[in-house]
Structures are given as structure tokens and as C-alpha cells.
Image: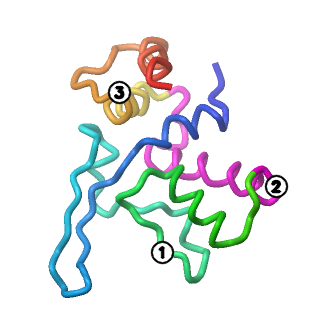
């Protein structure tokens, strides 16, 4: 079964990364992740898709879908416009591959990580088919 952009968007839309930042007065702020899996374990979490947009600073504590919406507003891309759709088709797969690997469709570990991240399961299923079933229940 092929993973579509819609599948990727759903998989990534609720993921939140834990980061530490500083408030205006220099006090560190840390927001806990909603995930127990590998997505939150990355040492330097970032949404790479947003890097080439000068003036836009992604909030790494927010869900990817929300940040894409903020970027679309920032860039004046009307929702469902050709530019919005083209950028969305770039964003979600790029971030999915960034966090789950290039061969995610056939990589059991990647699917297990995704199960931990979006389904918040401590012990993910032992097959890709079962992982997909767990993930499909979330979205």
C-alpha cells in the first residue's frame, strides 16, 4: 500500500516537538511533547521545509499542519490555491521523510516510530500492516 500526501499530512498534523527556547527576558521555556516516540527524541528538532522562507520562524512546539497554515498566511497563499497546494505537496512529504526516513513505506522501524508518535503506544505492532491499522484509527 502506497503512502499518499494525505496520509503523510494526517500522520504529521498532530506531532509536536519538545524544544527549549528563551522568553523575551531570557528565561528558558520548555514545552513537553505529546509524543513518547522517536519524533520527540531528535536532538535538534526542526521543520526543514520552513528554512528557505526568510522572515518566517517556525514554532517547533506547534503541530506541522498549524505551522504550514501560518506560513501560508505569511506568504499570502490562499487556501486551496495552486501555490498552496503545490507547497503542501512539498511540505508534508519532506517532513515525513526528515523524521521517518526515505524508505518509510517498507521500514518497520519507521512505522513503529510513527505508531509511538501519533498513537502514543509504548509497544507498537510487529508488522507494517498492523502499524497502519493503529495509525488509521487515529485519523
Q: Is residue 39 left or right of residue 51?
A: left
| Vertical position of residue 24 compared to residue 102: above or below | below
Mark 2 neighbour class, 10 Å CA radius: few under 14, some 14 to 19, many 20 or more = few
Q: Where is residue 109 in the image (x, y as percent from the top left)?
A: 37, 30
**Mark closer to the chain start, 1 or 2:** 1
Q: In which quarter of the image is the N terminus?
A: top right
Q: Distance between the residues labelled 1 and 2?
A: 23 Å
Instruction: Give whichever of 42, 58 is nearer the camera.
Output: 58
**Mark closer to the chain start, 1 or 3:** 1
Q: In this view, does 66 lie to the left or right of 81?
A: left
Residue at 31%, 31% in the rendered image = 116
| Vertical position of residue 61 compared to residue 58: above or below | above
> Under tag 3, what secondary structure?
helix
Residue under label 2, please give it.
Answer: 81
Q: Is residue 94 magenta?
A: yes
Residue at 30%, 20% in the rendered image = 124
Amino acid at each position: 500500500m502506497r503512502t499518499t500526501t494525505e496520509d503523510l499530512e494526517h500522520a504529521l498534523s498532530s506531532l509536536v516537538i519538545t524544544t527549549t527556547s528563551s522568553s523575551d527576558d531570557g528565561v528558558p521555556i520548555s514545552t513537553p511533547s505529546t509524543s513518547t516516540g522517536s519524533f520527540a527524541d531528535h536532538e535538534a528538532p526542526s521543520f526543514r521545509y520552513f528554512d528557505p522562507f526568510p522572515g518566517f520562524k517556525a514554532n517547533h512546539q506547534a503541530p506541522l499542519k498549524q505551522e504550514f497554515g501560518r506560513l501560508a498566511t505569511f506568504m499570502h497563499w490562499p487556501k486551496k490555491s495552486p501555490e498552496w497546494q503545490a507547497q503542501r505537496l512539498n511540505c508534508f512529504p519532506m517532513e515525513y521523510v526528515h523524521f521517518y526516513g526515505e524508505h518509510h513505506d517498507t521500514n518497520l522501524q519507521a512505522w513503529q516510530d510513527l505508531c509511538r508518535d501519533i498513537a502514543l503506544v509504548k509497544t507498537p505492532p510487529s508488522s507494517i500492516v498492523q502499524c497502519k491499522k493503529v495509525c488509521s484509527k487515529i485519523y
